[in-house]
C-alpha cells in the first residue's frame, strides 16, 4: 500500500483513527510506503493527537527503512528551468 503526502493537510480525529486502524491491521502483514514532508515530531499535529501519532509511528517504524531526501523539489525543477529559459529569451 502507498500513502502519499502524509501531513499535507491535518486530519480530523475520525480520519486519524481510520489511519491508525489501517496501519494496525497491516502491521507485520503487508508492506506500506509513505511519503511526507513532515518530520516525525510533527506527526502529532497532523493527526491531532500526539499519543495516536506515536502509536502509528511505533507500528510503522518497527520494521522499516527511512529514506530522508533533502534538496530542491523534483516537481519544481522543470518549472524553474522553463522560467529561466523564458527570462533569457526576453
Image: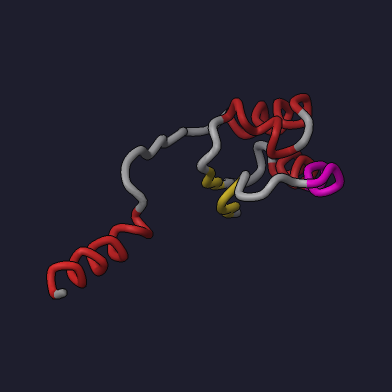
Residue 75: quadrant of the picture: bottom left
Q: Residue at x 35, y 38 (%)?
A: 70
In the rendered image, the residue lying farthest to the left is 88
21 lies left or right of 8: right
Question: For the N terminus, which image quadrant?
Answer: bottom right
Question: For the C terminus, which image quadrant?
Answer: bottom left
x, y percent for residue 2: 57, 54
Asked if residue 17 lies in the magenta stretch, the reply is yes
81 lies left or right of 63: left
Of 21 and 36, nearer the camera is 36
Residue 40: quadrant of the picture: top right
Residue 88: quadrant of the picture: bottom left
Q: Is residue 21 above or below residue 90?
A: above
In the rendered image, the residue lying farthest to the bottom is 89
x, y percent for residue 59: 67, 31
Of 58 and 28, nearer the camera is 58
Of 77 and 30, nearer the camera is 77
x, y percent for residue 24: 75, 39
Please identify the dominant SS of the magenta region: helix
Asked if residue 4 lies in the magenta stretch, the reply is no
In the rendered image, the residue lying farthest to the right is 14
Q: Residue at x 70, y 30 (%)?
A: 44
Q: Residue at x 60, y 25 (%)?
A: 41
Q: Which residues are magenta?
A: 12-18
Amino acid at each position: 500500500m502507498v500513502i502519499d503526502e502524509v501531513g499535507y493537510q491535518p486530519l480530523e480525529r475520525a480520519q486519524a483513527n481510520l489511519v491508525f486502524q489501517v496501519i494496525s491491521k497491516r502491521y507485520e502483514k503487508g508492506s506500506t510506503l509513505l511519503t511526507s514532508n513532515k518530520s516525525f515530531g510533527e506527526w502529532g499535529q497532523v493527526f491531532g493527537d500526539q499519543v495516536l501519532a506515536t502509536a502509528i509511528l511505533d507500528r510503522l517504524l518497527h520494521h522499516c527503512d527511512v529514506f530522508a531526501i533533502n534538496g530542491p523539489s523534483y516537481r519544481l525543477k522543470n518549472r524553474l528551468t522553463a522560467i529561466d529559459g523564458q527570462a533569457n529569451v526576453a
